[in-house]
Amino acid sequence: MILSTRRDPRLITIRRGGMLTDRDHHLLARWAADCADHVLYLSEDVHPEDLRPRSAIAAIRAWARGEVRMSDARAAGGHAMAAARTLDGPARHAAFAAGQAGVVAHVAAHELGAAAYAIKAVRAAAPAGRVEEAGRAECTWQRSRLPATIRDLVLDDQRRRNEICWSVFDEHETWSSR
């Protein structure tokens, strides 16, 4: 479970009573898609015929461009998570990252799920003794992809929800918004 019991209004769209603009919601979706896509090979190497994780990433990108409905992106994310449940290890985490990215259209706070599962995937794929290094490198890569307008929001979200995201963010570079 990567969602807090109390939702952050900064991650709820304005039309639902929160503070998140549509523009920033779309940026969060694109960033989540990038995080999931970066590790997708870990799922596809195991099950190249299962296109559900790739389809979820494509759907959330299409949603962010205004080409598909929220419900279509959310459904694609759910299908990717169903694919993940049949897998183990890195492939499972990578497929879950794709699923979490897909459902960002419905609940923006799933952006952190895509990032956390991607870090879990590379950690699980890393050779013994290189797990933390692999996790740090993935987190650093993810942070380098953050658009400036949502960087502080995401870094603060990582601080706040780190514990429920398996503490994958606390071992990495500082929390500064560099």
Image: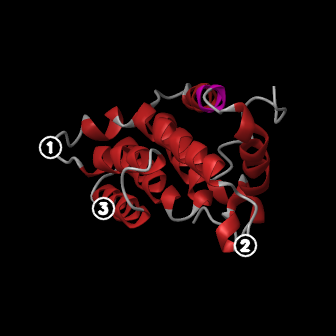
Nearer the observer, 34 or 59: 59
Q: Secondary structure at mark 2?
A: loop
> How far from the left and from the top, in percent, is residue 164?
67, 60
Quarter of the view holding residue 43: top left
Answer with mark 3 or mark 1, whichever residue precedes in sequence. Answer: 1
Which residue position is annotated with label 2? 17
> Mark 1 to mark 2: distance in Å?
41 Å
How many neighbours does mark 3 have within 10 angstroms: few (below 14), some (14-19), or many (20 or more)?
many
Does 147 sit left or right of 64 as displayed? Answer: right
Q: Residues within 10 Å of mark 2 (few under 14, many from 20)?
A: few
Tags 3 and 1 in contact by the CB under 8 Å rule?
no
Marks 1 and 2, the one that precedes in the sequence: 2
Q: Residue 22 at what x, y percent from top left? A: 61, 54
Drawn side of residue 46 relative to residue 117, left or right = left
Q: Looking at the magenta stretch, what is its main secondary structure?
A: helix
Residue assigned mark 1:
49
Quadrant placement of the N terminus: bottom right
For the magenta stretch, what is the residue range? 139-144
Amino acid type shown at disc 2: Gly
Q: Which residue shows up at 76% across the image and 65% down it?
A: 9
Residue pointed to by mark 3: 79
Query: Tag 1, which secondary structure?
Result: loop
| Camera-side mark, 1 or 2 | 2
Residue 120 appearing in the image? no
